[in-house]
Every structure is written in structure tokens, then in C-alpha cells.
Amino acid sequence: MTGTWKLAKLILRRERLIAPAWILLLAVLAAGQAKRYLQTFPTPQAIADFAREMAANKALTAFGGEVYSSTVAGMAVWKNADAIYTVLGLLAILTVVRHTRGEEESGRAELVGAGVVGRLAPLTAAVLVTSSLMVITGLVSAAGMIKMGFDVTGSLAFGAAIAGVGLVFTGIGAVAAQLTEGARTAIGLAAIGLGVSYLLRFVADGSGLGVLKWLSPQGWSHLVKPYADNHWAVLLLSLALAAISTLVAYRLAARRDLGHGVIPQRPGPAGSTRLRSPLALAWRLQKGLLTGWIAGYAVAGLVLGSLALSIPEVSKQGAAVQEFLRRYTAGEGATMTSAYLWLIALSLGYVASLYPLLALLRLRGEETGGRAELLLTTPVSRLAWAGSHLLIALAGSATILVVAGLGLGIASGDALGVLGGTLVQIPAVWVLAGVGVLAFGLLPRAAAGISWAAFLFVNLFGEVLGPILGIDYWIAKYFVPFPNLPMVLSGEPFTAAPLLVMTAITAVLAGAGLAALNRRAV
């Protein structure tokens, strides 16, 4: 463990801007939503009526979880807690992998290890700092709720539920960092665990099979039931899994060589004749990531589509239900099932916008690893090299959504109709690809940060941050592409204009990024 404290201080220095930003963001999501509900529902009866309407809406229950408390604080937790749990889990994975596998991949870990540093010190420092940040996030969120006058015990239970998810995925991220030689692959493996956990919780609340929630780390935090029963004992499961996964990570770290993973990389065939073009090489590098996304979306489509058959109709008289229908339907005859299917298609599009960003960040990895410079010494132009990866990012995004749409449609009984709902998401996803190319071309060192910031902004602004900041949902259309899409699954006629505009925006952004790449130093 020699050198752990110095490495921890180094990590804190590198996270001094990023960590406070996302801690504050997640705390604002919690307290800001509660403040909004205090203004919207000024009486206990008003919030109780709202809670009753939401509890009857199975489409929203699947997304937010069960309603456990009909108080303002309880409904604020219901609205945003699942988003907070999932985003924090992702941030835990990114942080711990960045300071373990990312350091080994860049060669800095070997340089640091040449000094007076113990073998397990880098892993210990990364886990210690990341776990501390998770706990601080929970404490700050709880403090924000207490500051607003809500129940202290419930607020602390909510903060503990937030920290519990973060600790679990800190451990899972540490394990993933030991398994592979690449940071991107490690993040992907850990993110699969996060996605499966979310899907289990989603199905549990959407179908009524509450037992499935006991198989999900996010589900455990839901079962704490802040501001209702405050079941602290459930968090023992989170602490146990976090401890076990961390111990497994230590065991694996002690048994592998520096720079290598437990799962060895599979080299390509010697003397292969398949890599005859930049596109063939890009496909060789990208096919693993794309295959994983396709498989995940195929399963998600089938599972989420099967829940559509069990969505009951609800009264359309309540103000909250009217607002829900205003956002996600566009016709008098729209049903809760059609609204659910559109909401699922929209959610799949939001998440799928991460794929082209990850695929395009491979360009930066090839550049920093020196492989791009070597490739460009051959008769391969920069535009051909980057354009090949961009083509796969765009085509891969479309393929992922087609597969998801087919699974969603087959499971719900309307394959072609639902497929159309996922196809219209493609141009909106492509806009994020344009942002990724522009960031890589203009600001390569900040490309990863810009890509993740763009993804989180698009996913949080319209549905979560906008209402908290007092910005109407429809104003989000000026900043986020997805609210502009025609709601073809819930009564709105298809119109090609917004899709053509998004495609044109993608072309402009990508063109500017490629032009900048062609002019800058590699």
C-alpha cells in the first residue's frame, strides 16, 4: 500500500473540477425537484392526489419506480431518484476505471510504479477516492433535503441509498478494470452490469414482479423507501456487494501483470488479407463494441415490449396525467399503451446516442496510442481514416435502433408500426455523432469530456433539469433534438422536416470536425 495517500491526492487534484460539478448536479436534481413540487402542490391534498395519479400510471411507474410516500419529499424521490442512482453508478464506473485501467493503458501507471509505490496502491487510491466521492454525494443530497425542511431520517435514508448505489458500482468498475487491457472495454463491461441492474428494476416495477427488485443494486436503493419506511437494513446488501467486488478486484490485481488483463486480448490472424482499407480496419476495431450494443438492445427491446401488453388504461382527468399525455401523445385516441411505447422508443434513442460518441472516441485512443500516426504514414488520408470510423458510428447507431425496434414491436404485437417509432430516433442520435466528430477535430484533448457532457446534457435537460430550472419542456426543443421528433407511435402524423434538419445539422458538424482534423497536428 506504499504511496496510496500520495496517489489519492493526485486523483483528487485531477478530479478537482469534474467531481464537484457532478456532485452539485445530482444534489440539485434531488432538492430542485422537491422545491418545484412545493410550488406546484402547495397543500397535502394536492400532492396526495398527484401521488395517487402517478401510482395508477404503470407507464411512469416502470420508469420511476413504485410510489412509497405521498409527501412532497417522497414524490421528489420518486421522480428523480432512479435517474440519480443510474447516473451516479455510471460516474462511479468512469472514475474508478479512469484512475486504474486508464492509467495502465496510457503508460503512466508503469512510470509511477517505477518509484516507491506498492503494487496495490493505485487500485486502493482509486477505490478510496471514488468511494469517498459517492458518500459525499449522498451526504450533500441529504443535506439539501434537510435544508429545505424535510424529515431528517428520510433525508439521511435517501442520501444513504444514493451512496449505496455508487459504492456498488465502484466495486464493479474496479473488477472490470482488472479483466481487460483497454479502459473502453472495462467501462463497457461494467456498464453492462449497470444496464442489467436498471432493466431488472424497470421490469420489476413495470410488471409488478417485485421480487426482481431484490436482484438489482438500484432496486435495493428503491427498497430503502426514503420518507416512508426508511428500511436501512436493505443497504447491507449494497455494502456487502461493494465489499465483495472490491476484494475480488484486489485478488485479480495481485494475479495479473501490469498493463495486461485477466482476459487476454485476442490477436488477429497473422498475415490477414482482410485489412485492405481504412474501413476494414475501423470495422475490426469497432465490431466488438457494436456487437455488444446490438445484443443488449435486442434483449431490452423484447423485455420492454412484453411489458406493453400489461399497461392498463387510466383516467385522463387528472392534471398530471394530462401533462403526461401532452408530452408523449398527439391524438385524441392515444392510449396509455401507445404512450408507453413511444416513451420506450424515445428512451432507447436517448441511450443509443452514447454509442456513436464511444465509437468516435476510438479515434482519440488511436491517436494518443501512436497507432494513428503510424497508419497515416501509409497512403491513407486523415479523412479516409476518420471517415471510416464515422461511417461505422452512423451505420451502427441505425442498426442498434432497428434491432431494438424489431424486438420491441415483436414483443408488443406490432412489429412494423413500432419499428417506425425507433427509426425516427436515428437522425437525433446522429446529431450527437456530429458533436463527437467536431470535438475530436477541434479540441482533441477535451473530446472525451465534451462527449460525455453532451450525452448527459441531452439525457437530463429536457426531462429532468429543465423543469427544475423552470424551463418548459417544449423549450427543450431548441437545445435537445429528441423532443422535435414526430410522435408516430402515439397519434402524430409522420413529418420528414425535423429529421432532414437533424441530418443536415449532423452533416455540418461532422464536416466542420473533419475539416478541423485535416488542418491540425496529429
Image (tube, rainbow, N blue to C red):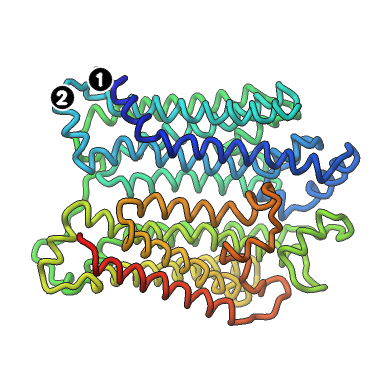
Question: Mark 2 falls on what kind of element?
Answer: loop
Q: Residue at x 62, y 48 (%)?
A: 202
In the rendered image, the vertical position of residue 211 relative to residue 409, given as above or below:
above
Q: Residues within 10 Å of mark 1 (few under 14, many from 20)?
A: some
Q: In the figure, 385 relative to 154: above or below?
A: below
* Residue 305: % across, % down: 62, 62
Q: Which residue is mark 2?
A: 115
State if disc 2 and disc 1 touch (CB < 8 Å): yes
Relative to 246, 418 lies left or right: right
Q: Nearer the viewer, residue 287 or 455?
A: 455
Residue most extreme to the left: 271
Label placed on residue 23: none
Residue drawn at x 46%, y 63% is 432
What secondary structure is found at the residue carrying circle 1?
Answer: loop
Give the alpha-carbon distance from disc 1 to disc 2, as whole Å.
9 Å
Q: Quadrant of residue 443?
A: bottom left
Mark 1 highlights which residue?
A: 3
Residue at the location (32% across, 36% down)? 99
Q: Quadrant of the C terminus?
A: bottom left
Q: Residue furthest top?
A: 2
Residue 400, horizontal then vertical, whole percent = 46, 66
Image location (x, y in percent) of residue 508? 42, 74
Image mark count: 2
Quarter holding the N terminus is top left
Label 1 amino acid? Gly
Q: Residue at x 59, y 69 (%)?
A: 410
Which one is earlier in the sequence, the residue at label 1 or at label 2?
Answer: 1
User: In the rendered structure, which amino acid carries the disc numbered 2?
Assistant: Gly
Q: Residues within 10 Å of mark 2 (few under 14, many from 20)?
A: few
